């Protein structure tokens, strides 16, 4: 895999009820990341971009859903999701 730029690894946050509950209870952050990125690449990108220390990274490959519009079936693209656990004493605030 080619070396990815840190700003291209993290694509955004995943905002859902589950991700908010995980953040409140376990201080985990859920991010949408590039499909080609690895755990170590994600860890380095988060540490550089947000200036925090990462304890561990868990990665899931999400398959795109199939949507129907009349007779036509379309498949949404596949994507990758990362659960980031931070070291104690560190936090990322996305609200402001």
Image (tube, rainbow, N blue to C red):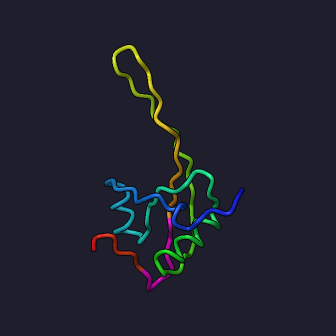
Q: Quadrant of residue 96?
A: bottom left
Name the spot of residue 64 as percent of width and height, x first. 49, 37
Work out whether 61 lies above or below 73.
Answer: below
Count of marks overlaid on the render: 0
> Does the magenta segment cover residue 67?
no
Work out whether 56 lies above or below 83.
Answer: below
Work out whether 71 lies above or below 42.
Answer: above
Name the spot of residue 81 as percent of width and height, x first. 50, 54
Work out whether 63 lies above or below 16.
Answer: above
Residue that lies at the very extreme toward the right in this rendered image: 1
Q: Which residue is rendered at x = 50% and y = 71% of the image?
A: 85
Q: Quadrant of residue 38?
A: bottom right
Name the spot of residue 16 as percent of width and height, x first. 33, 53
What is the span of residues highlighted in magenta in the rendered image?
A: 84-90
Name the spot of residue 30 as percent of width and height, x first. 44, 61
Residue that lies at the very extreme toward the top in this rendered image: 71
> Does the magenta segment cover residue 85?
yes
49 vs 53, nearest the viewer: 49
Q: Which residue is rendered at x = 38% and y = 23% of the image?
A: 68
Location of the N terminus by quadrant is bottom right
Q: Which residue is rendered at x = 56% and y = 75% of the image?
A: 55
Taking the image as shown, residue 51 lies to the left or right of residue 19, namely right
Residue that lies at the very extreme toward the bottom in this rendered image: 89
């Amino acid at each position: 895999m080619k070396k990815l730029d840190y700003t291209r690894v993290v694509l955004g946050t995943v905002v859902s009820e589950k991700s908010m509950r995980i953040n409140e209870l376990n201080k985990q952050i859920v991010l949408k990341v590039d499909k080609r990125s690895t755990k170590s690449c994600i860890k380095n990108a988060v540490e550089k971009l947000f200036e925090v220390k990462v304890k561990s990274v868990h990665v899931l490959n999400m398959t795109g859903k199939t949507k129907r519009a009349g007779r036509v079936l379309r498949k949404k693209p596949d994507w990758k999701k990362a659960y980031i656990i931070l070291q104690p004493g560190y936090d990322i605030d996305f609200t402001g």
